[in-house]
Amino acid sequence: MAVLPLIIEPDPLLHEVSQPIEEITPEIRKLAQNMLDTMYANQGIGLAAIQVGVKKRMIVVDVDWPSPRYEDDGREAAPEAKPVIMINPEIIRASEETKPYNEGCLSFPDQYSEVIRPAAITLRYMDLEGKEQTLEADSLLAVCVQHEIDHINGIVFTDHVSKLKREMIIKKLKKLKKIGTVPPIHHEEPVPR
């Protein structure tokens, strides 16, 4: 498949609401695989279609693979990739308990900030076979899924931080774009299958 170019903030596309997927076509299946390839190549654990310029309500996540970006977070990585493709995902329940997490984003290279989100969620989505699925998530999976669902709703992680912190991050990214050091790196390590 292919590693797609990432949309980097500031970009108005990242703030647009994505459209529902009405039918699972060969193009949607190909997009899902390309999104996984892109996520793995950039050492991510989640990616929304809008981040590769497609305004469709689809996200991919894999919090189990041993991404070098998450080596020090104390989790036990799986020996192999365990991707989950979610079409039209929606959170149907969120815990009252919240938890902070130092979030980053492939569309905000090398920028991180603490975001407070519900500690556990229940979500509903459709898989690539068109079957409705329900998933209970907590820990890093809950953070990742909430972050990616925000993306398809036109929300980015810096919308959850102070105005000052948001402005600092945007200023850094504008400067990096101006001097040509962005878009982000595509790593040459093997893509999990």
Image (cartoon, rainbow, N blue to C red):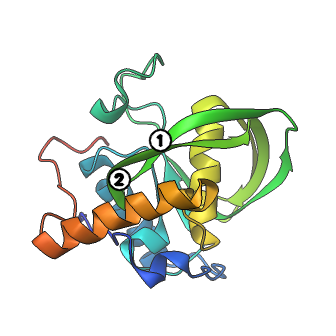
Which residue shows up at 42% across the image and 23% down it?
78
Residue 147: image x %, image y %? Answer: 58, 53
Which residue was labeled with disc 2? Answer: 39
- For the point 46% across and 30% down, the residue is 64
Foreground pick, 137 / 190: 137
Say whether residue 154 is left or right of residue 125. left
Residue 171 in picture, x, y percent from top left: 34, 66
Determine whether 99 is above or below 180 in the image.
above
Q: Residues within 10 Å of mark 1 (few under 14, many from 20)?
A: many
Which numbered dot is residue 28?
A: none
- Look at the image and tell me in which quarter the N terminus lies: bottom left
Give the residue type at disc 2: Met
Q: Amino acid at mark 1?
A: Asp
User: What crowding class fits label 2: few (fewer than 14 Cα within 10 Å), some (14-19), or many (20 or more)?
Assistant: many
Quarter of the figure with residue 99: top right
Q: Residue at x 63, y 60 (%)?
A: 149
**Disc assigned to residue 62:** 1
Tag 2's secondary structure? helix
Question: Badges 1 and 2: C-beta atoms under 8 Å apart?
Answer: yes
- Across the whole image, how many numbered discs are drawn on residues? 2
In the picture provided, is 130 more to the left or to the right than 94? left
Residue 36 appears anywhere in the view: yes
Q: Position of residue 47 (x, y in %)?
A: 45, 57
Q: Name the N-terminal-most of marks 1 and 2.
A: 2
Of residues 22 and 163, the one nearer the viewer is 163
